[in-house]
């Protein structure tokens, strides 16, 4: 057998390599396509305006296996400025691209009767409209449906007395928004349970069918098919699936910060030894955290703690639907002063179209200090310079880096958007009402607990499953079937 063993190893290695190619498993998650936008054409003022529009809606708001979603997009505001995923809905299933949004509750898709839905996307993705009439499993949701009644409490649903149809209207600050009606249909997904990939799983869910979009939602530059709300109210998909025992009531994401973007999104708790957790502020419509203080270079800034307190339209919100990050007035002024003082002897500060920027010729990590956002329970979110700076352009031989934190004028709102969330695992543990995080290379695999009560753990190469159901486990299964043939073949060469 001594002569056969190397031959067997070679055959298995070759077959495994070929199988990986056939299964289309990338070593890391990458954007599917290049974004055909000229770098730096978009000014920070435009990004602030985009974020302002969605914040209007934020401020107006009065267990089974691991479900794994692909992630595309990037935080980079000069490329994409959003992260999105794909969902399959209906029978037969159709695929839709939807923005990942922890700042809202509802999954909604543009429908075939939509007025104002974009026809094309600057993201170079195929836009699709959902047609309930073409799905054999679709049904309308009536006002008498218990789910519709539950949505009324969180302002996620409404009712028309004439049609008896459960509906919704989400309005943005400038009047742009979306409205439509609710349907129930099948969600198709892959899940991992006890080490095995279960493909073509389905579950009935209720989601929005958009018939009207106005304002910014009609633009095609970053158009997607809809928004995937990951809030904790009853109509969010995570709440619906967990109430049926299909998934645990916890989800996690890890958003890659490199230009290639992508990342990990799972229904389940990603397990990492260095996770820190802070409690969610109770009885809030969004993911509000109790921010206590901000440190720059190890020094706590002199900010009145009341600036961070949570009340109506005040507090700190985690929102993956926001590109940049935002601080309350008083906190922003203290933060800007501390950063400028820390680097004043090394770099030249400049104002670029109203934004505080700095011209530098070396690495930002060698010049700019670490920033720490300090939360209740002793949890600190450590920000490296790339977590609060945005490279805008080059002037001569110097790079221009601008402060990515912005000010929400006249309001004590702090919003942690993709600029801050990237390159970290974030876990939203809705059972224990807490959020946790740790720095992480989001191109790597993760371990995910499928049931936070039993502690069962799945070792998941999360984000690597393709939509057609092919998986690394299926490849390994194929090799297991071929193994006896391979060994028999080897014996013939003795």
Image (tube, grey):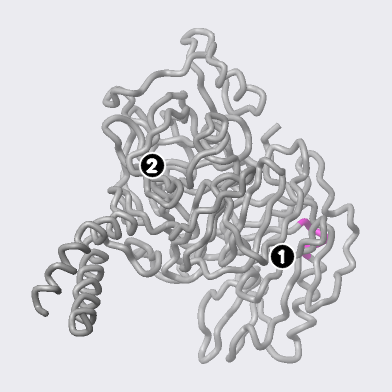
Q: Is residue 472 left or right of residue 71?
A: left
Taking the image as drawn, is residue 181 in sight?
A: yes
Determine the secondary structure under disc 1.
strand
Image location of residue 165, percent across then percent down: 48, 15
| In contact (CB < 8 Å): disc 1 and disc 2 | no
Nearer to the camera, 469 or 385: 469
Q: Is residue 402 left or right of residue 9?
A: right
Task: Choose mark 1 or mark 2, whichever is in front.
Answer: 2
Nearer to the camera, 304 or 479: 479
Residue 64 magenta-drawn? no
Using the numbered discs, state the Cα–Cα distance from disc 1 to disc 2 in whole angstroms: 32 Å
Q: Quick one: quadrant of the N terminus?
A: bottom left
Q: Residue at x 58, y 91 (%)?
A: 361
Q: Quick one: quadrant of the C terminus?
A: bottom left
Image location of residue 115, percent across then percent down: 38, 31
Residue denoted by label 1: 381
Taking the image as drawn, is residue 50 in sight?
A: no
Residue denoted by label 2: 189
Whichever of labels 1 and 2 marks the residue nearer the N terminus, that label is 2
Looking at the image, the residue that sits furthest to the top is: 162
Determine the secondary structure under disc 2.
strand
Quadrant of the rendered structure where residue 169 is? Answer: top right
Residue 351 against residue 168 in the figure, above or below: below
**Magenta range:** 328-332
Mark 2 Cα shell of 10 Å, populated few (<14), some (14-19), many (≥20):
many
Q: Residue at x 61, y 57 (%)?
A: 426
Image location of residue 413, percent across then percent down: 75, 51
Mark 1 Cα shell of 10 Å, populated few (<14), some (14-19), many (≥20):
many
Q: Residue at x 45, y 46 (%)?
A: 193
Q: Does the magenta stretch mainly form a helix, a strand or a loop?
A: helix
Image location of residue 302, percent across then percent down: 89, 67
């Amino acid at each position: 057998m001594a002569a056969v063993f190397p031959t067997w190893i070679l055959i298995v290695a070759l077959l495994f390599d070929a199988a990986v190619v056939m299964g289309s498993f990338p070593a890391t998650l990458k954007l599917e396509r290049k974004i055909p936008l000229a770098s730096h054409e978009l000014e920070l003022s435009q990004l602030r305006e985009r974020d302002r529009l969605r914040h209007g809606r934020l401020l107006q708001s009065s267990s089974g296996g691991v479900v794994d979603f692909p992630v595309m997009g990037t935080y980079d505001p000069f490329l994409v400025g959003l992260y999105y995923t794909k969902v399959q809905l209906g029978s037969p299933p159709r695929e839709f691209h939807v923005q990942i949004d922890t700042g809202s509750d509802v999954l909604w898709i543009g429908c075939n009767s939509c007025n104002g839905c974009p026809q094309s996307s600057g993201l170079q993705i195929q836009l699709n409209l959902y047609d309930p009439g073409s799905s054999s499993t679709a049904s309308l949701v009536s006002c008498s449906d218990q789910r519709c009644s539950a949505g009324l409490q969180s302002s996620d649903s409404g009712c028309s007395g004439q049609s008896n149809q459960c509906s919704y209207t989400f309005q943005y600050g400038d009047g742009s928004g979306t409205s439509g009606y609710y349907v129930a249909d099948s969600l198709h997904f892959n899940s991992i349970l006890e080490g095995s990939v279960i493909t073509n799983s389905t579950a009935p869910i209720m989601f929005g069918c958009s018939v009207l979009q106005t304002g910014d939602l009609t633009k095609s530059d970053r158009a997607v098919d809809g928004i995937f709300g990951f809030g904790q109210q009853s109509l969010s998909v995570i709440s619906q699936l967990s109430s049926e025992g299909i998934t645990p009531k916890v989800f996690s994401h890890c958003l890659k910060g490199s230009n290639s973007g992508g990342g990990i999104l799972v229904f389940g708790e990603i397990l990492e030894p260095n996770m820190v957790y802070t409690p969610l502020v109770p009885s809030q419509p969004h993911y509000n955290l109790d921010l206590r203080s901000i440190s720059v270079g190890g020094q706590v800034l002199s900010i009145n703690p009341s600036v961070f307190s949570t009340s109506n339209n005040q507090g700190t919100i985690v929102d993956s639907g926001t590109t940049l990050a935002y601080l309350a007035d008083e906190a922003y002024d203290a933060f800007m002063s501390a950063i400028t003082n820390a680097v004043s002897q090394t770099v030249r500060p400049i104002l670029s179209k109203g934004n505080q920027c700095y011209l530098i010729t070396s690495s930002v990590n060698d010049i700019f200090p670490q920033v720490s956002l300090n939360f209740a329970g002793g949890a600190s979110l450590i920000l490296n310079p790339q977590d609060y700076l945005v490279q805008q352009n080059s002037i001569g031989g110097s790079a221009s880096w601008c402060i990515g934190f912005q000010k929400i004028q006249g309001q004590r709102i702090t919003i942690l958007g993709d600029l801050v969330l990237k390159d970290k695992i974030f876990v939203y543990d809705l059972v224990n009402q807490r959020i946790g995080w740790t720095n992480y290379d989001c191109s790597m695999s993760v371990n995910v607990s499928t049931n936070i009560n039993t502690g069962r753990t799945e070792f998941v190469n999360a984000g690597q499953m393709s939509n057609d159901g092919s998986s690394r486990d299926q490849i390994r299964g194929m090799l297991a079937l071929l193994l006896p043939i391979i060994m028999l073949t080897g014996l013939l060469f003795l």
